[in-house]
Image (tube, coloured by chain):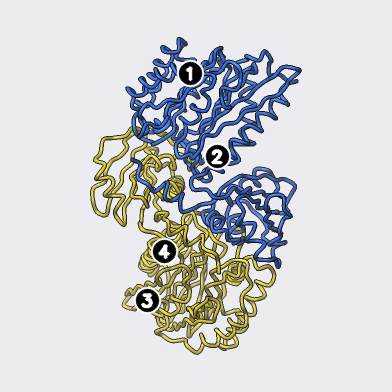
Chain colours: A blue, B yellow
Amino acid sequence: MSVTAPKGFRASGVACGIKAGGALDLALVFSDRPCAAAGVFTTNWVKAAPVRYDQTLLARRQRGFRAVVINSGNANACTGPRGLSDVYALVETAGFLLGVPPEAILVMSTGVIGVPLPMDRLRAGLLAAVAALSEGGGEAAARAIMTTDTRPKMAFRQLNLNGVPVTLGAMAKGAGMIHPHMATMLALITTDIAADPDRLDRLLRETVEESFHRITVDGDQSTNDTVLLLANGASGLALDARTEPAFREALTGLCVELAQAIVRDGEGATKFVEIRVQGARTRAEARRIARHIAASPLVKTAFYGADPNWGRILAAAGAAGVSLDPDLLSLWIRRGDGHPLLLFDRGAPVPYLENEARAVFAAPAFQVILDLRLGEAEDWVWTCDLSHDYVTINGRYRT
Amino acid sequence: MSVTAPKGFRASGVACGIKAGGALDLALVFSDRPCAAAGVFTTNWVKAAPVRYDQTLLARRQRGFRAVVINSGNANACTGPRGLSDVYALVETAGFLLGVPPEAILVMSTGVIGVPLPMDRLRAGLLAAVAALSEGGGEAAARAIMTTDTRPKMAFRQLNLNGVPVTLGAMAKGAGMIHPHMATMLALITTDIAADPDRLDRLLRETVEESFHRITVDGDQSTNDTVLLLANGASGLALDARTEPAFREALTGLCVELAQAIVRDGEGATKFVEIRVQGARTRAEARRIARHIAASPLVKTAFYGADPNWGRILAAAGAAGVSLDPDLLSLWIRRGDGHPLLLFDRGAPVPYLENEARAVFAAPAFQVILDLRLGEAEDWVWTCDLSHDYVTINGRYRT
């Protein structure tokens, strides 16, 4: 189940020839009725044309959104004035084929940067995508937005709000190392709740902070990163102060599931690691240190090599640009539900069994816990290791 | 020629058993007469014991320095209170053996983090190192400070100041990816000029900014990074307002040579790349963007794969946290003394021959030039690619 899980949504995924070998590369998601929409976009100063387009459109806070067109294989970024005029042509065509105004359509792109969109192929592809729209098309759409992803990423939630069933569906793509990353992350979430655009916008921003932004370095995002949320109201229930808490919980769970799926499918990733920093003065400082540890190539290669080389973790923490007292630091590692293994306590190494430490680092998923003992705040991020395959995938020539 | 090139310096490199297999791992550099000294140290909040020790000692601005003890294989970082007491024991022993006060001795360490120094081996090693001191010992010392370096890094300069020959000698180690890096960079520079500690300190800071800091992310340094400069005055000439310009030029050239040698010997590196950002509002902003590009794993793997995937360079530039206008950006690449090849001009891709672009990226050394068109400032950094070997070297288990 994916974006077509909520009532009133149809989708399709087709091959229009952007990618070689007939792989799916064009997704279309359509709502039978007008939607409120919200978006969270990359903070990169170099933004792709579809990002610029969607941001402008969503700033108007209109409610009449009907469709999202997403292509993979080409990011339509760094394509100059032509990039934006191609987006206009794309929504013009899609609107004509769907019988809706062009401004009811949002656009996402992911793939190679700096190459103009092959518009003839996309126009023909749109025709096929419109014809293929169906309530069962969610998985094809999720496959059509993949780039180096090894599997489609879908999730859904159903909840009962005041006796009314409300559904959320979602798909996402993203398989760059993510952290530090410039590989595009796209996500589209659909729901049949009715919502005011302002409330939807605030809720999405808060939810992304708890989910996708835990795998993303602020200010270090791709040209195309986009999370969109469409709410078409087909359930008959509205998002308001009473229904928001339960809806928010479902939305957050959905986004965390997708965010973790992206890390688990990271390019060449063999391990899923949670970096938790506690005892910080502020949550922002805790996250900054956690991100810096998670971004360190030396730490990530140690994860890959299953080498409990914890000195690299402390060195990365000290280099995050956040003042700390090395004599107060303690560090634990922990596998699944196991007991935390203390490696470093208040500034000094402690005796531990090397085999136990290696067993944690050899696990497919584990946790690193750093206590700063400076305050009460904590935060965490999710990351993966840096492997030979990552270099192979990204060192490969584009064609 | 290395640290023993200037008059009055002797050195040695011995194997004391920190490293396996009898590799050289203890270097000693000794001056026949007292030296003025200056140091530039890591900005990491987690500082190794020898860094804390040297910083305290140098802050006194004394003139009586006589020797530097450097071990490789063990960083003496994150070793708790014992780390610092081991440094005291080390200078105590070295001072006794050399017949100089302990406070005349500076210390550097590099290697694995979190493991106490094997003091018995070091004491025995110091005895051998003192016995082996010689004017020809510069190369052995340079070899003894290597970790994952594939070759020793040495440089020297001779200049004639007011008819007096003055010599500078130096050795360095460092072969982490450097950028972003947490692999230790150590450098020791000796000279026979006489100098006031304050002047020496200022000159070294300015010079490091033009050389070693071009391969290092500020605030992202190892626990042990150290550059030391010892001036023993044996030439009979003093560093003053008149002699400083020529001496500074020689010192800068020496440091740039070593800094570039470190990048060229980067772990697994196959390419040397200069990232130059021009048209910036300030030099600091230019360097921040250049560093962000140089630190991007996606850019570095593209260098490795000889893939002129210039979109990744623009995406990294936009993610540096510096405001810029993507519609003003231009990008060139350039091989050696060749003509710059324009890839992207004022916000739009330009037609170029793919073969020509690939030829540049396939070269062992090339330049990336990004023009922001926001001002007159420029700066540049040196970096290397990210290869399979980098992952192999750093994913390997410590033992």
Q: Are marks 1 and 3 in contact (CB under 8 Å)?
A: no
Q: Mark 3 or mark 4: which is in front?
A: 4
Spatial CA span between label 1 and label 2: 26 Å
Q: Are marks 1 and 3 on the same chain?
A: no
**Dot 3 and dot 2 within a common chain:** no
Residue at mark 4: B262
Residue B186 horizontal/vertical position (percent): 49, 68
Q: Quadrant of the N terminus of chain B?
A: bottom left
Name the disc covering residue A133, or none: 1
Label 1 – label 3 distance at C-alpha: 78 Å
Location of mark 3 (residue): B167
Q: Residues within 10 Å of mark 3 (few under 14, many from 20)?
A: many
Per the model, the C-alpha gap separating discs 3 and 2 is 57 Å
Q: Which mark is residue A262?
A: 2
User: Mark 4 Cα within 10 Å, few/some/many (few <14, many 20+)?
Assistant: many
From the top left corner, tell me how far across and down residue B62 is, in percent.
57, 75
Residue for point 56% across, 13% down: A34
